[in-house]
Image (cartoon, rainbow, N blue to C red):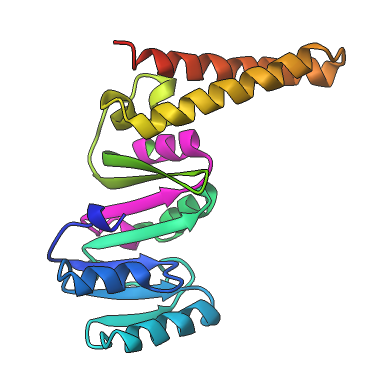
Amino acid sequence: MASMVTTGGILADIGTDHAYVPIALVQRQKIKGAIAMDINEGPLARAQEHIRAARLEEYIQTRLSDGAEALLPNEADSILIAGMGGELILHILTEGESVCSTAKELILQPQSELAHFRRFLHQKGYCIEQEKIVLEDGKYYPMMKVRKGRESYAREIDYRFGKGLLEEKNQVLYQFLLKEQKSLETVKARLESANTKTAKARQKEIEIDLNYAKEALKEYEV
């Protein structure tokens, strides 16, 4: 995610926790400074300790903040929100829209509700400029750089899996799709042996998800 931040600006890290990202970016001289923000005093205290240990108090300030509440419009060039569920990030963006919309870019790492998340961004007039996905310790972490601007999304698989990732035939996404297909097929087979209304309804949902995973995998055959 740090590599997605544009050089030379001020970063606001919402939900900073340990402040590792702003510290790393200042140490690499990639940003001029940062505002490390968190809703809880405990994580913010740890962030302050790490900032002092790195002797970067002059470059990184901390703020207790519920989302973007303590951030002013045009105060940050880049806003980073990571390590949260998709719905929570959307809540932060919605509640702090007057502030978040003034940033040049948003660096986001939603951990759930990805199709809904991308659709929300599209409807709010954001363009997903870049996407990455990382596999670590068996878990997949999608992330994206977002700016104001329109883009055309015509397919459900673009919302579900990421238009940019599919276009570049991202190999980590490919691994995810194969794993997803296998998992869905296993669940489908188990549900087929159950003869209840609930099982049949769930089976239809699984079939829809499976068809989209297969459709996305066909992108890698082209």
Q: Is residue 211 above or below residue 39?
A: above
Q: Position of residue 95 (x, y in %)?
A: 45, 59
Do we see residue 125 in this rendering? no
Question: Does 192 lie within the magenta span?
Answer: no
Query: In front: 122, or 56?
Result: 56
Q: Which of the image's four quarters has the N terminus?
A: bottom left
Q: Which of the image's four quarters has the C terminus?
A: top left
Task: Name which quarter of the figure residue 154 lies in.
Answer: top left
Task: Name which quarter of the figure residue 19 lies in.
Answer: bottom left
Query: In front: 221, or 126?
Result: 221
Q: Is residue 143 above or below residue 72?
A: above
Residue numbers of the magenta segment: 98-122
- In this image, 157 relative to 99: left or right? right
Residue at 47%, 38% in the rendered image: 114
Q: Position of residue 137 (x, y in %)?
A: 51, 49
Do we see residue 76 in this rendering? yes
Residue at 35%, 36% in the rendered image: 122
Q: Position of residue 64 (x, y in %)?
A: 45, 79
